[in-house]
Amino acid sequence: MTLVSGTNDAHLICVKCRRRTPLAGLPARCDTCDEPFEVEYAIPRTGRDAVAHRKGSIFEQFAAFYPFLAADARLSLGEGRTPLVRAHGVARELGLEHLYFKNETTNPTWTFKDRGTACAVQHAVSQGFKRLGTLSSGNMGASIAAFGRHAGLDTFVLLKAGVPREKVAAIAVHQVNVLLVSGDYDDIYQRALEVGQAHGVYFSVSDEPMRIEGYKTLAFELVEQLGYEPPDFVAVPVGSGGLCRGILKGFEELARAGVIDRVPRMIGVQSEGCSPVADAYLSGSDDIRRCAAPRTLDHVLENPAPPSGRELLRRLRATGGLLTKVGNEAIISAALQFAREGLFVQPASATALAGIAKLVERGDVPRDARMVSVVTGTGLKYPSILETYGLTLTETSIEALQEAIGGLSGTPGVVHV
């Protein structure tokens, strides 16, 4: 909820019980109802002047939506301002008229996580913190490591034991403190927050308020890139639920500022191997049951009890959003569709597109809708996934090269525009 009049009085507010607390400090969850906090502040109804282009970081550019943030451009790694790609070929395959990919792989550490991390680091430094930390399955750890070292902060990355070695190396290369922690993910999450309070470590976890504020910038950019005409649907993979919450909050603030006249409908997509939020939505339940044995193609989707799950469920129901789940075969098919458009994506990214395909096929979304699929991360983060794609190569000798090329009839499956 964002105030639309009066003086700016930024504070944190619990998304459920509406309890207020000061913006300073480290609260990630309400100790009354165990729900996340979010930032609430006053925003004038200034129309498009609120998103007028300015130089500097994305938080300086969209300063009207960050009156509580003393943005320091020196802390930026060039996050945001990612491309919006018109997906002609895949749109044709799915029978859609307007499909776009918001390509978050061009962020500094190749995922959307950098938006949230950048905002969290800005806030942490302005509050005088010298230590930064996170709990991660890989991508957020790399983001916190990069931004933390760049800001000169003593940085701690907690990884659940069993994270793929290549992800550990991509974090450790920044020469931060990496801890492989055994135990239940939910227990580690709670313990990390306690340790942070005790040792002055600003733990930016998945539903930390400033991380949600950072994700708003994706909505701001989409509206600019589409000529201030918001899309009809935005599809996002759901792990913790924070990204979907942040994008929706951004659209809602744009509407309250008078920049757009309607809020797009969000589509949250989970893998069938870990789908507690989608299962609750599809069954009509308000209770999100913990996934007992998560098993997906991508560790970033294996959040057995999403911290933002209950709030995301409430918000999507209140705004006409949709939640669905897709299987591994559909995810792989979507990943190959991305590849035919020139993008090698992480399986989580393909999950969103697979969800669009499922909803379109069932008639739950119209084929003439303007649809955006958020490409959350690059496939280079998870190269072992290539083993599941059944890719083939043609081998030949130099003497037989002319004959080999002559025998190949184009690239199978490519839709030429």
Image: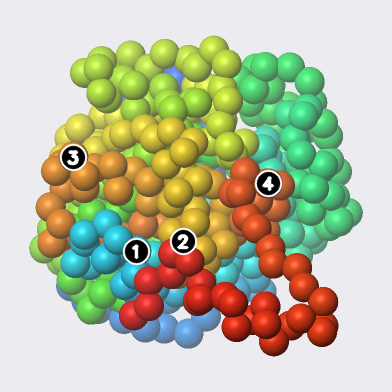
Which residue is depicted at the point 80% across and 48% down?
166
Which residue is depicted at the point 21% across and 44% down?
361
Give the left or right position of residue 194, taking residue 18 as reference: right
x and y percentages locating residue 290 in the rendered image: 48, 15
Camera-near label (3 vs 4) is 4
* Separation of residues labelled 3 and 1 (CA atoms): 17 Å
Tag 4 near tag 2, CB within 8 Å? no
Which of the two labelled residues, at mark 3 and mark 2, occupies the earlier sequence position? Answer: 2
* Separation of residues labelled 3 and 2 (CA atoms): 21 Å
- The residue type indicated by label 1 comes to Val
Q: Secondary structure at mark 4?
A: helix
Figure check: 42 above or below 343: above
Figure check: 11 above or below 247: above
Which residue is the site of mark 2? Answer: 338
- Few, some or many residues within 10 Å of mark 4 (<14, 14–19, 20+): few
Which residue is the site of mark 1? Answer: 90
* Separation of residues labelled 1 and 2 (CA atoms): 8 Å
Q: Quadrant of residue 308?
A: top left
Q: Which mark is residue 387?
A: 4
- Few, some or many residues within 10 Å of mark 2 (<14, 14–19, 20+): many
Tag 1 near tag 2, CB within 8 Å? yes
Which residue is depicted at the point 74% across and 83% down?
401
- The residue type indicated by label 4 comes to Glu
Give the left or right position of residue 332, taking residue 226 as reference: right
* Separation of residues labelled 3 and 4 (CA atoms): 30 Å
How many numbered discs, if any? 4
Give the left or right position of residue 201, taking residue 13 as reference: right
